[in-house]
Amino acid sequence: MYYQDVVGHAMSNEVLQDIRNWIPSLGLDMSKKDKLTMYVQDLYAILHALWVDDTKPLHGFIKAQISLLLLLSAATATCPGALVESASNKGSNKALWFKDIELMKVRSLKDRSRSTLVANVNLENVKNKERDGTP
């Protein structure tokens, strides 16, 4: 699609067939690799820059959405793109929505004045989940 947007026409089927035959001859590594998640220090640095160091602050709701996406990505060990863009149901435009996140306030049994926020996240519509079962 990008090629067509730039030059104004699609590649011919002969060129596409040639590319499909040429790519396997490169001997590229096709093995599955683990994708590293974000370290806590990296998450802290990004959130600190977003909320404290930012000299041109974003709109409050956008800042909250970015923070939520980063926190969920770190907590679920999922790439942010897998949460935002879903290929689980092609053509349905399904991804992680706010309705898929349930926040609960849990009080401490030892000190009733302290509480912890817990998020229950439904990862049903995460990218690539339908293809191989793993987000």
Image (cartoon, rainbow, N blue to C red):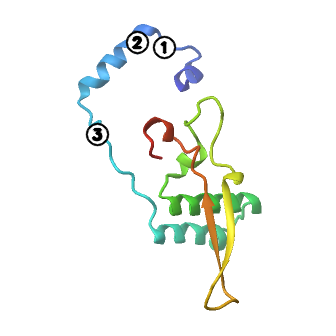
x 68%, y 65%: residue: 103
Q: CA distance from mark 1 to mark 2?
A: 6 Å
Instruction: Give the residue number, with chain letter if any, for mark 2.
Output: 15
10 Å neighbourhood of mark 1: few (<14), some, or many (≥20)? few
x 50%, y 37%: residue: 130
User: In front here: 33 or 124?
Assistant: 124
Answer with mark 2 or mark 3, whichever residue precedes in sequence.
Answer: 2
Q: Is residue 74 left or right of residue 106?
A: left
Instruction: Give the residue number, with chain letter if any, for mark 1.
Output: 11
Please tell me how many numbered marks the rendered image carries: 3
Mark 2 or 3: in front is 3
Above or below residue 26? Residue 109 is below
Q: Secondary structure at mark 1?
A: loop
Marking on residue 124: none
Answer with mark 3 or mark 1, whichever residue precedes in sequence.
Answer: 1
Whether tag 1 and tag 2 are in contact, CB under 8 A, the answer is yes
x 69%, y 89%: residue: 112
Q: CA distance from mark 3 to mark 1?
A: 29 Å
Q: Secondary structure at mark 3?
A: loop
Q: Is residue 94 left or right of residue 20?
A: right
10 Å neighbourhood of mark 2: few (<14), some, or many (≥20)? few
Above or below residue 41? Residue 36 is above
Instruction: Give the residue number, with chain letter if any, for mark 3.
Output: 31
Q: Quadrant of the N terminus?
A: top right
Q: Is residue 60 left or right of residue 135?
A: right
State the image coordinates of residue 111 (x, y, percent, origin top left).
64, 91
Q: Secondary structure at mark 2?
A: helix
| Three-letter residue code for mark 1 | Met
